[in-house]
C-alpha cells in the first residue's frame, strides 16, 4: 500500500533504524560531525556567515532583566546586583553574560551542545566555566548509566555530567546536574546529547567546495602555461640551473601537548610561481591541455540550490544569506517574519535554560550573603533585549506603535521594550529633560522680556508653535539684566 517503504532497484537502499536515539547518535558519530562542522565554520565563508549572523541577530547587545517587585526599591536593587555580577561572570577571561551568549549560539549551531559549570572564583564571586561539547565525555568511565558523558537514572532523567576539565590530562569528573547548565537544541525528545545543527549540510558542503576547488585548480593550471621548452637536459634546463627545493620548516616532535609536525619543503616553482609557466619537455614528448571549460556557467545555480538547502535546514530564510537584493518589499517582510520566529526560538532556549537559572543563582548568593533581602516577588522577572530587531519599515512601524499607545491599544512599556529600552528609565530621562527645558525657558524669559515662557519652552522643546515672538525679541536686540522676578513664567 505504501510505495515509499518498498525497496526498489530505481533508488539506493537507505538504513533502517527504528530504535532509540542513543543507538544512532553515538559518541563517534557526534564527534565526527562536530569536527566536520568546525572545519566548515572555519573554512567555508557562507557557513561562518550564517552561524555568526544568527548569533548576532539573536543576541545583539544582550538582554536586561526587569524584576516586577511590589517593593520597587528591592526590584531595582536586584537588577543592579545581577548586572554587576553578570558583567564579568566568565571564569576563564571574565567575559560578560552577553559575550557568553554569543558563544552559546555558535556552540549550539556548530558543536551541537555545550555547557557551564556553575562555580566561583577565589574571592567567592559567582562564575560560569564554559565546557565545549567535545569535553563532555565518558572518558574512562565504564557504567551503563553514563551515556556519552551524561549520567542518567533508571528512567533516563539527567543526574549529572562527566566533564574533562582543562588541565586534567584526559581525566574526567562528574558534575551534578544542579551545578551544570546544559545548552542544546534537540531534534528528538529522547536525545541525551545533541548533533550539530549543520549535520544536514556537511555532505553537500564538502561536495560543493571540492568541485569549486577542482574547477579553480583546473582553470589556474591551464591559464599559467606561457610556452614550452624542449631540451635534452630536462633536469638542468637552460637559463634556470638545477632543480631546487629548500626546507622552509623542519620537522618537530610532539611536545607540550602539541602534535608532531612534518618537514615542509618549497620548490623553485613555488618561489617563482605565478603566470607564465614554461614546462620542460624531453625530445619526442608532446604537451596536450585538457579542455576544461571551467568554471561552468551553471555552477552558480547549482551552488544556490545547495546553499538554499543548507539555510532551510538551519531554520534561516535563504535570502538572508544569499542575494537579498533579488526579492521585493512584500517578500522581504515575509522573510523577516520567518527569521523572527527562528530568532525567538533561540532566545527562548537561552532565556529559559540559562538566563533565568543564572539570575536566581546570583540573587540566592546575594540573599545568603545579606546583600539582598528575600521576597517572593524576586521570582517575577522579564527579559528585555537591549536592542531593536531588524526591520525594513522602522519609521512606519514606530509611527503605528505610537498611535496605538495614544489610542490606548498599547502601552509605553511595550513600545520602549521593542526599541531595546526600559520605560521607567526613559521616564526619568524625560523628566530630567523637561526640567532642563523649563529652566532654560525661564532664563530666556529673563534675558528677553518680550518672549513668553510658553513660546520659549515650545522652541527649546521643539514643539509645533509659531516662532514669531522669538524672532521679534531677538530682532529688538534688548538684553535686560536677569532678575529673580523675571525668572517666573509670564502670565
Image: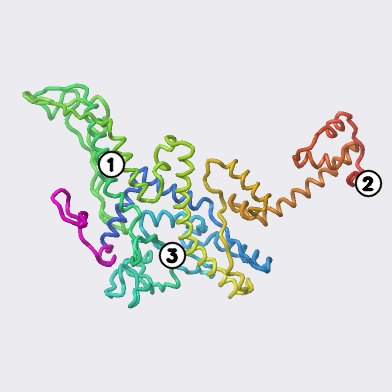
Whole-Å distance between the Cαs marked 1 and 3? 35 Å
Residue 235 location, x and y as percent? Answer: 12, 30
Q: Which residue is mark 3?
A: 116
- Give the class, few, some or many, for how many residues have Cα within 10 Å of label 3's Cα (few <14, many ≥20): some
Q: Nearer the viewer, residue 284 or 59?
A: 59
Ranked by sequence position, the earlier of labels 1 and 2 is 1
Q: Nearer the viewer, residue 484 or 279?
A: 484
Using the image, tell me which numbered label, if any, was put on residue 485. Answer: 2
What colour scheme does the image use? Answer: rainbow
Position of 415 relative to 216 (above/below): below
Mark 2 or mark 3: whose residue is earlier in sequence: 3
Q: Evaluate whether residue 24 shows in this view.
A: yes
- In the depicted structure, whether residue 420 falls above or below residue 380: above
The residue at the point 41 percent across, 48 percent down is 316
- Which image quarter is the C terminus in? top right
Q: Is residue 308 magenta?
A: no
* Label ID, residue 209: 1
Task: State left or right for residue 333 relative to residue 372.
Answer: left
> Disc 2 and disc 3: Cα gap in Å?
65 Å
Residue at image coords 28%, 41%? 209
Q: Are marks 2 and 3 in contact (CB under 8 Å)?
A: no
The range drawn in magenta is 1-26
* Label 1 crowd bin: few (<14), some (14–19), many (20+), radius 10 Å: some
Question: Residue at the location (24% across, 39% down)?
Answer: 211
Amino acid at each position: 500500500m505504501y510505495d515509499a517503504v518498498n525497496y526498489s532497484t530505481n533508488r539506493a537502499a537507505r538504513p533502517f533504524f527504528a530504535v532509540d536515539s542513543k543507538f544512532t547518535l553515538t559518541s563517534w558519530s557526534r564527534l565526527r560531525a562536530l569536527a566536520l562542522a568546525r572545519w566548515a565554520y572555519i573554512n567555508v565563508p557562507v557557513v561562518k556567515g550564517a552561524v555568526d549572523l544568527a548569533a548576532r541577530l539573536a543576541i545583539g547587545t544582550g538582554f536586561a532583566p526587569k524584576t516586577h517587585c511590589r517593593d520597587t526599591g528591592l526590584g531595582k536593587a536586584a537588577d543592579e546586583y545581577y548586572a554587576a555580577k553578570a558583567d564579568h561572570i566568565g571564569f576563564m577571561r571574565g567575559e560578560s553574560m552577553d559575550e557568553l551568549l554569543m558563544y552559546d549560539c555558535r556552540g549550539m549551531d556548530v558543536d551541537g551542545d555545550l555547557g557551564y559549570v556553575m562555580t566561583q572564583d577565589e574571592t567567592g564571586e559567582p562564575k560560569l566555566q564554559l565546557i565545549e561539547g567535545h569535553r563532555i565525555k565518558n572518558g574512562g568511565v565504564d557504567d551503563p548509566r553514563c551515556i556519552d558523558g551524561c549520567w542518567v537514572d533508571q528512567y533516563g532523567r539527567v543526574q549529572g555530567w562527566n566533564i574533562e576539565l582543562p588541565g586534567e590530562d584526559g581525566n574526567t569528573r562528574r558534575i551534578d546536574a544542579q551545578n551544570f547548565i546544559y545548552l542544546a537544541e534537540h531534534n528528538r525528545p529522547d536525545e541525551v546529547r545533541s548533533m550539530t545543527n549543520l549535520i544536514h549540510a556537511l555532505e553537500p558542503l564538502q561536495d560543493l567546495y571540492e568541485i569549486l576547488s577542482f574547477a579553480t585548480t583546473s582553470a589556474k593550471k591551464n591559464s599559467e602555461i606561457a610556452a614550452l621548452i624542449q631540451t635534452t637536459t630536462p633536469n638542468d634546463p637552460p637559463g634556470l640551473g638545477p632543480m631546487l627545493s629548500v626546507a622552509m620548516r623542519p620537522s618537530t616532535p610532539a611536545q607540550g601537548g602539541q602534535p608532531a609536525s612534518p618537514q615542509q619543503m618549497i620548490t623553485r616553482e613555488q618561489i617563482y610561481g605565478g603566470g607564465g609557466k614554461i614546462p620542460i619537455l624531453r625530445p619526442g614528448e608532446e604537451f596536450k591541455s585538457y579542455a576544461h571549460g571551467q568554471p561552468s556557467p551553471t555552477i552558480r545555480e547549482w551552488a544556490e540550490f545547495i546553499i538554499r538547502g543548507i539555510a532551510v535546514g538551519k531554520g534561516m530564510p535563504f535570502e538572508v544569506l544569499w542575494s537579498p537584493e533579488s526579492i521585493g518589499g512584500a517578500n522581504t517582510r515575509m522573510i523577516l517574519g520567518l527569521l523572527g520566529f527562528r530568532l525567538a526560538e533561540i532566545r527562548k532556549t537561552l532565556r529559559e535554560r540559562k538566563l533565568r537559572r543564572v539570575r536566581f543563582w546570583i540573587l540566592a548568593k546575594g540573599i545568603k550573603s545579606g546583600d539582598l533581602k528575600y521576597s517572593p516577588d524576586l521570582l517575577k522577572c522579564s527579559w528585555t533585549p537591549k536592542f531593536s530587531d531588524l526591520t525594513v519599515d522602522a519609521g512606519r512601524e514606530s509611527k503605528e506603535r505610537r498611535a496605538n499607545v495614544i489610542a490606548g491599544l498599547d502601552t509605553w512599556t511595550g513600545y520602549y521594550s521593542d526599541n531595546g529600552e526600559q520605560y521607567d528609565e526613559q521616564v526619568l530621562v524625560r523628566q530630567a529633560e523637561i526640567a532642563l527645558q523649563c529652566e532654560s525657558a525661564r532664563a530666556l524669559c529673563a534675558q528677553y522680556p518680550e518672549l513668553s515662557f510658553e513660546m520659549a519652552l515650545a522652541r527649546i522643546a521643539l514643539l509645533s508653535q509659531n516662532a514669531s515672538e522669538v524672532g521679534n525679541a531677538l530682532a529688538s536686540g534688548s538684553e535686560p539684566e536677569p532678575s529673580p522676578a523675571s525668572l517666573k513664567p509670564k502670565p
